[in-house]
Amino acid sequence: PMRLANKIALVTGAASGMGAATARLLAREGAKVAVADLMETEGRAVVGQIEAAGGEARFIRLDVAEEADWEAALAEVTGAWGGLDILVNNAGISGSATNDLYDTGLWDRIMAVNARGTFLGVKHGVAAMRQRGGGSIVNLSSISGNVGQERIHCAYNASKAAVRLLTKSVAVQEGAAGIRVNTIHPGLMPPMRTSGATADPVFRAKMLGHVPLGRSGEVDEVAQAILFLASDEASYVTGAELHVDGGYLAC
Ligand code: NAD
């Protein structure tokens, strides 16, 4: 049996990387999936892959930092499919290793997408889920939300720490509404499209030395963890942090 039969999901940043893998997996488990991203061509390609596999999906152009985009996106999803059960706040950007640590504009851009974008998703997702009597929100933090790291920009670390505590705060306050909110903390993964730091082979090799499983992760391994938190199998899990990092944070 499919684990997400009759569920309606929205995944941000779903045109690429872990978001695309998550959108495909949720659809394979029976959810109708809104593929939300800035990148229209790549996003529509993910919708095409889902449909080719027999699933149901639609592309929504969404800038997570823009509140009007969230209003339009939720109106489209609830109008088309009747509600929202699962929200994955996955869209994110990082700085590069060569960025000035004290660049105010970069701080603002990273915080706008990663922190404000997740806040807006939670705000509008919760409003839609309340009408259904509950739901599950999965927010993408990172190992970088837990510890400082060489070459990772301070704004990225700070934004991912904001996601952690935003998640716990809302989990506490929305538990009575039946809404679960959890974070996923990926470790050393394929480099982000926007990242200069984790693309650097010297940095990757150094990080690998701190990964007990001795390898970097695959996007599907993160998607599987998101699927668990999104599904009813995690019905008693809220405010939790799931590290999908090969043991990095255990060291
Ligand atoms: P990615 O760069 O491959 O994909 C991110 C997607 O988000 C892209 O499709 C991009 O277009 C979209 N996006 C960016 N800004 C947006 C905005 N304002 N509105 C809507 N969409 C936007 O990234 P990834 O590696 O798949 O990472 C996904 C998430 O996991 C991010 O939140 C990232 O911070 C986090 N993460 C990544 C790593 C890693 O090493 N790759 C590790 C830990 C955590």
Image (tube, rainbow, N blue to C red):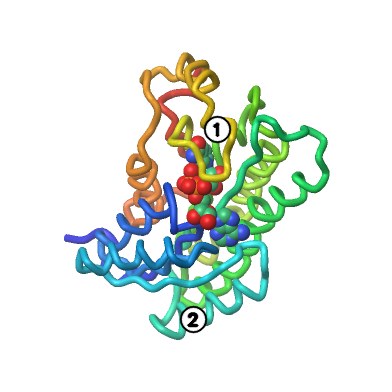
Where residue 177 appears, as percent x and y from the top left, is: 53, 66
Where residue 219 appears, as percent x and y from the top left, is: 37, 42
Left or right of 189? Residue 28 is left
Q: Residue at x 48, y 32 (%)?
A: 187
The crowd level at tag 1 (other Cα within 10 Å; few <14, some 14-19, many 20+) is many
Classify 170 as above or below 248: below
Q: Residue furthest bottom?
A: 79
The front one of 14 and 237 is 14
Pointer 1: what residue? Answer: 143
Classify 15 as above or below 216: below
Classify 79 as above or below 52: below
Cα separation between marks 1 and 2: 33 Å
Q: Is mark 1 within 8 Å of ligand 1?
A: yes
Of the image marks 1 and 2, the number of the one nearer the N terminus: 2
**Residue 156 seen in the current view:** yes
Left or right of 87? Residue 103 is right
Q: Which numbered disc covers residue 26? A: none
Q: Amino acid at mark 2?
A: Glu
Q: Residue at x 36, y 51 (%)?
A: 21
Where residue 121 appears, as percent x and y from the top left, is: 59, 63
Q: Residue at x 37, y 18 (%)?
A: 214
Classify 166 as above or below 5: above
Q: Residue at x 49, y 22 (%)?
A: 201
Pointer 2: what residue? Answer: 76
The front one of 112 and 231 is 112
Kind of element beneath mark 2: helix
Q: Amino acid at mark 1?
A: Ile
The front one of 214 and 163 is 214
Q: Quadrant of residue 28?
A: bottom left
Kind of element beneath mark 1: helix
